[in-house]
């Protein structure tokens, strides 16, 4: 099939209790396409400034990512600075500079418009909707979001939700969006809007898939050390959709496996800063963790 | 086999955002024996005051619990008052009156001393050790604890830990006891003290079994509504050990199943206040949730 990913490509400055990394490569589009590239050849749609390293773009290409949709514009690349506490679930945003992403309003290449799977990363819901309108009969539309849009563009977000098949969000974001604490009940409210699947990301506690016909709990792989949780959710979604694109079958059995592959990919990315760990994985690294997750829940 | 449970039998006043219940029956011994009674006939060792209702003791007996070890003493029963926020994981203790439990130092009946499985509920670790000394060659010793003892009787707790096979605690308590945030690393530190299994209870996120030879993740059953989380951990341990007593086999396959049965029992108890939901379950209620949990993690 074919998977197009729309998301940010950015510089991140990340502080953890042990280390600080200045201006390393990040962004939801980067993480999700680097996770997806182990399963398929994703198309990446984003924009960077002319300060963005050509060698990173070359790396994405080497990993089989189609970067024709990655625009390089005069100006500075999107920048985010965040800080984590001893509990890696506690994250604080120190600074966000939107820069060239301010006017991001991509016109998809004709070939991209015929993509069968679309991943709308956690960008402005109006932008997500504008992109959807360019697509010709996609088979599967997935979107992610963040609390910023739930708080500031709730109506637009709910409108976009009516046009998607899979909705990814953190558990707390789903609660915020629906006003319902119970994750199953909250997700069922969202299913009524149109999606056939809500994927509730729960960080170290894994992910819950709530479908119209089934519920599945993907537990997290148990990492020896969480170095940098940045991008875990985007990586999860990228692995999930990359796998779906590779199998081209959207039934429950494949959705369950997709969530486990997403979990596996997320388990790698958090073991080092930024995209470091996603650069040189092998399929056997991935399969090994997939099998360990099978054993982890076997009874 | 034979299972002896040592824990509190108490009155609890519980406030949730919606309801307040005054002086309902609770206590770690009550919850764990009522969970275990669906698998075996546990022996309960505890003490209550003469204000404790005879009809509750009759109920325990009717459920197949051996209450010869439940002493009724002149005075008032242990009392606890707690309050929950909208997030049921947030609990505040308002009041604790130890009452007759102050001098609890049970002398086990000769028959109880020959019990093959022992569950030391979350009582004073010195008391736990004193009970262990009365046992003649038990096959499996399990203990639970709470942060109170980690903070006030750490040395005694670590001494008791050297004599037990299975250590139950909440994830945060394990972190507190070891000073290590990573639950696997923290649990491995505890395994070095003697236990062959650490059971990290994670509330709504299930439980993690960390053994010398394996790791298992038991996910929580997804309840429609959490009414009262009191006793969930004790109920989990009671179901776990009740099942172990019924099969008499302590290998990994049975430990995994035991954790799932513990999860099932805990899923019932939180659906109503106090012990209400544990009074009238059927084996088919239990098997139904066991099977749903199999489906929940299947991939």
Image (cartoon, coloured by chain):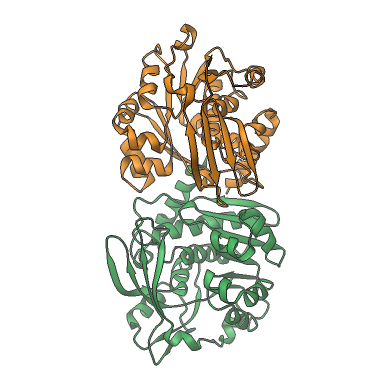
Chain colours: A orange, B green
Examine the rendered structure and indicate whether residue A50 appears above or below residue A177.
Answer: above
The residue sitting at 37% across, 25% down in the picture is A164
Query: Which residue occupies 40% across, 13% down?
Result: A135
B46 left or right of A291? left
Give A240 or A57, whichever is nearer the viewer.
Answer: A57
Q: Residue furthest bottom?
A: B74
Q: Depth check: B60 or B164 in front?
A: B164
Residue A240 x/y as whole percent: 53, 30
The image position of residue B3, as x and y in percent, is 55, 73
Depth order, front residue of B161/A274: A274
Residue B153, placed above or below residue A270 = below
Residue lying at 52% horizontally and 19% vertically, measured from the top left = A75
User: Which of the 4 quarters of the picture holds residue A137?
Assistant: top left
Residue A217 at least partly seen: no
Identity of the residue furthest to the front in this view = A75
Is A11 on the left-hand or right-hand side of A107? right
Question: Number of marks in the image?
Answer: 0
Q: Is residue A95 above or below residue B81?
A: above
Please provide percent x and percent y for residue B166: 62, 65
- Apparent side of residue B52 relative to residue A22 in the rendered image (left or right): left
Q: Position of residue A46 (x, y in %)?
A: 50, 20
**Nearer to me, A79 or A34:** A79
Residue B27 seen in the figure: yes
Give me the residue at 67% from left, 63% from top.
Answer: B190
A5 relative to A228 in the view: left or right = left
- Please determine whether, in this image, residue B151 is positioned above or below residue B101: above
Q: Quadrant of residue A166?
A: top left
């Amino acid at each position: 099939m074919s998977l197009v990913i729309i998301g940010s490509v950015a510089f991140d400055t990340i502080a953890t209790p042990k280390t600080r990394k200045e201006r390393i490569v990040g962004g939801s589009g980067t993480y999700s396409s680097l996770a997806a590239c182990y399963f398929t050849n994703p198309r990446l749609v984003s924009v960077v400034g002319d300060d963005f390293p050509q060698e990173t773009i070359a790396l994405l290409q080497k990993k089989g990512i189609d970067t024709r949709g990655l625009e390089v514009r005069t100006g500075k690349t999107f920048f985010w600075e965040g800080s984590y506490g001893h509990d890696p679930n506690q994250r604080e945003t120190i600074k966000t500079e939107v820069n060239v992403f301010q006017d991001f309003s991509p016109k998809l290449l004709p070939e991209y418009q015929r993509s069968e799977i679309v991943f709308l990363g956690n960008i402005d819901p109006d932008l997500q909707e504008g992109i959807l309108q360019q697509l010709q009969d996609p088979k599967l539309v997935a979107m992610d979001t963040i609390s910023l849009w739930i708080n500031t563009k709730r109506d637009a977000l709910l409108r976009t939700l009516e046009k998607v098949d899979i909705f990814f969000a953190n558990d707390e974001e789903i609660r915020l969006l629906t006003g319902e604490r119970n994750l199953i009940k909250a997700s069922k409210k969202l299913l009524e809007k149109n999606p056939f699947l809500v994927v509730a990301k729960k960080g170290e506690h894994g992910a819950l898939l709530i479908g119209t016909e089934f519920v599945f709990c993907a537990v997290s792989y148990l990492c020896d050390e969480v170095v940098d949780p940045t991008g875990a959710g985007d990586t999860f979604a990228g692995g999930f959709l990359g796998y779906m694109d590779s199998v081209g079958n959207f039934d429950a059995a494949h959705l369950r496996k997709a969530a486990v592959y997403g979990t596996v990919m997320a388990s790698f990315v958090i073991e080092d800063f930024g995209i470091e760990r996603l650069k040189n994985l092998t399929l056997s690294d991935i399969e090994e963790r997939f099998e360990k997750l099978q054993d982890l829940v076997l009874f």
